[in-house]
Structure formats: structure tokens, C-alpha cells
Amino acid sequence: MANNQILKSITLPDGRRLHVVWGDITHEVVDAVVNAANSTLEHGGGVAGAIVRRGGREIQEESRAWIREHGPVSTGSAAITGAGRLPARWVIHAVGPVWRGTGDEGQKLAAAVKAALSLADAHNVRSISLPAISSGIFGFPKPQAVRVIWRSMLDYFLEHPDSSITDVRFCNIDLETAELFRAEAERFLSHSSSTEIT
């Protein structure tokens, strides 16, 4: 879809804006997009494949150069490259867990989200768009993934009140996932006060 649609926008007490977007992350006009990557940064399918198809082979080439220099990206970590022809400056490659039902996947997904946000801060990113990491071919159940990603983002801003990030967009091409993020935003609004993130 060429025109991304905002399903819900909210403002946090600290002034940061959160947007739930139904659409193609490769069309997001932001400082950085987050890629749901694997540990070798080989971008074949899903969001990763779409990012390389639209952004150009240089994203894959930069990713391979990153791997040559640093080695594989561990689960719960992230790497950063340029964005090629995407309407963004950076691609942050976050490696979430493969769902195995062993119990620690939530912690690993939370770590991946926070690693991506930390890299964004290191590059003075103000606007960032991220998908439901691990919920595609990695098999993380979508409702749980959405809850973990949302909570991790809120926790990150509580832990880093001086973060450069002012706009966060949760962008997903499938309507089911986008609606799950909208429901999470509604849940947050119904439980939060006007003075604090809860």
C-alpha cells in the first residue's frame, strides 16, 4: 500500500508522540526504520526482504560489512546501517527471538526493542518506525509480541528520559497486527493518568 494510514495517535505525558500505522514500513518518512533481522543480517524475506528490495542492495552490502567487522548480531541486540533509497536516514536491524515456547522469548524481544532504541539515540534519531519484531517467520505470537514491544518502548523512555526520540511509529503491513497495536494504545490510554506513564 502506497499511503500509510495512521490508526491511532497518542501523546505521552513527556510530550513524545506514538502512532499506530497500517502500511508499508519502506514508505515511512522517518529518521530510522527498524528491521526485523536475523543474526547474520541476511535480508531475504518478510520486512527485511522488503527493506532491501525498496532501499537497494547497498543495505545488504553494508550489513555484510557490519558482520565482517563485528560478527553475528546476538538475539536481543541490534546493528545499524544506512537506508539506501528509503525515505529514512538509517535502518536499525533488531534481532528478536525465534519463538520456541521456552519462556525467555519475552525478555529477548524486550532487549531487542531497547537495543534498537538505544542505537537510535546514539545517532540522534528523533523519529523512528518499527514493526512487530519476531511476529512473522520467527513465530512469536502476535498479541504477546505487541504487548512486549509496547511495554519495552515505555520502559525505555522511563529509563532514558533524555532520549532524542520524540516520535515513535508502530508500522505493520497486516491489518491484524496494526489493530493489535491500536488496542494496546487504547488500553494504555484507559489505564494511564495525565501525569505519568503506567
Image: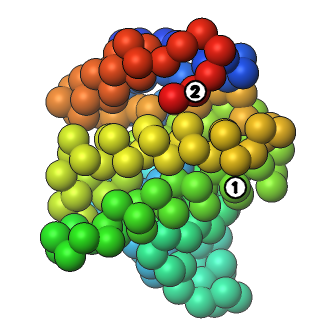
Q: Position of residue 100 (x, y in %)?
A: 18, 74
Residue type, numbered disc 2: Ile
Image-based side of 105 in relation to 171, left or right: left
Instruction: Using the image, tell me which numbered label, if any, was put on residue 118.
Output: 1
Name the residue rendered at 25%, 47% in the picture: 144
Identify residue for label 2.
197
Q: Position of residue 133 (x, y in %)?
A: 37, 53
Image-based side of 82 in relation to 109, left or right: right
Whether tag 1 and tag 2 are in contact, CB under 8 A, the answer is: no
Question: Disc 1 or 2, which lies upstream in sequence?
Answer: 1
Mark 2 burial class by Cα count in 10 Å: few <14, some 14-19, many 20+: some
Q: Height in image: 82 above or below 104?
A: above
Name the residue rendered at 18%, 61% in the picture: 139
Name the residue rendered at 32%, 41% in the picture: 146
Q: Tell me which corner region of the image, top left, top right, bottom left or bottom right, holds residue 37.
A: bottom left
Q: Tell me which corner region of the image, top left, top right, bottom left or bottom right, holds residue 42.
A: bottom left
Residue type, numbered disc 1: Ser
Q: CA distance from mark 1 to mark 2?
A: 19 Å
Name the residue rendered at 72%, 35% in the picture: 165
Q: Height in image: 143 above or below 171?
A: below
The answer to whether residue 33 shows anywhere in this view is no
Mark 1 burial class by Cα count in 10 Å: few <14, some 14-19, many 20+: some
Q: Tell me which corner region of the image, top left, top right, bottom left or bottom right, holds residue 177.
A: top left
Image-based side of 65 in relation to 141, left or right: right
